[in-house]
Image: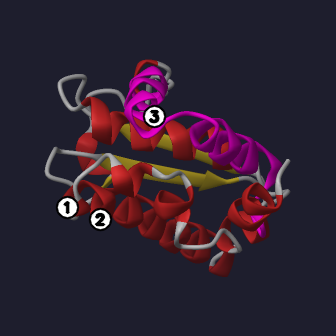
Amino acid sequence: MTAGTEDLTAGLPPALAEIVEDFNALPVADRLQLLLEFSQGLPPLPPRLEGHPELMEKVEECQSPVFVDVEVDGDSTTHLHFSAPREAPTTRGFAGILAEGLGGLSAQEVLAVPADVGSRLGLDQAVSPLRMRGLAGMLARVKRQVRVATATS
């Protein structure tokens, strides 16, 4: 890990830090291919949420219809669920990154994730600012749901 990479991963949980390292190891043009791979790897929704976007929170910052649901177990473990259309690979890729990078973390670890994840991924050089706001919106919704879940438990 180089000094520049250490700066990019500072304060990130290990899985998300590894994703940031993977993106930054690639030229900008290849980062979109990796984003596509994350879109293809987005886990399916659990049966109780499949076909029920009304049970999830809409991410208004996204151009595509994206929905998020976060569960926090009694032991403070988070479980993230995203619904994003297959025809929106950028948005779906962002959801895949967050699902892989944050899923299974404690509520406190999720809340501590810096808001600048998108720029740390180096995607702001390859994706429009409007789409980057979608990623920021997804992260903000995840954190809000974690705060709500932990405040009521």
* Magenta residue check for 95: no
The overriding secondary structure of the stretch rendered in magenta is: helix
Q: Earlier in the sequence, mark 1 or mark 3?
A: 3
Secondary structure beneath dot 2 equals: helix
Residue 110 in view in this figure: yes
Specify the amino acid type for callout 2: Arg
Q: Earlier in the sequence, mark 3 or mark 2?
A: 3
Q: Residue at x 34, y 35 (%)?
A: 92
Measuring from the top left, give residue 25's x and y in whole percent.
64, 37
Q: Are marks 2 and 1 in contact (CB under 8 Å)?
A: yes
- Rendered image quadrant of residue 95: top left
Q: Badge 2 is on which residue? A: 133
Q: Mark 3 packing: few (<14 Cα in 10 Å), some, or many (20+)? A: many
Q: Is residue 25 above or below residue 47?
A: below
Which label number is shown at residue 31?
Answer: 3
Extreme residue toward the left, this view: 63
Q: Residue at x 36, y 53 (%)?
A: 125
Q: Residue at x 68, y 62 (%)?
A: 8
> How many labels were placed on the picture?
3
Q: Quadrant of the C terminus?
A: bottom right
Q: Badge 1 is on which residue? A: 130
Measuring from the top left, give residue 127's x and y in whole percent.
28, 48
Q: Disc 2 and disc 1: Cα gap in Å? A: 5 Å
Q: Disc 3 and disc 2: Cα gap in Å? A: 18 Å
Q: Is residue 21 above or below residue 26?
A: below
Q: Is residue 17 above or below residue 119?
A: above
What range of the chain is rendered magenta?
Answer: 10-38
Measuring from the top left, give residue 144's x and y in whole percent.
49, 73
* Magenta residue check for 11: yes
Q: Mark 1 packing: few (<14 Cα in 10 Å), some, or many (20+)? A: few
Q: Are marks 1 and 3 in contact (CB under 8 Å)?
A: no
Secondary structure beneath dot 3 equals: helix
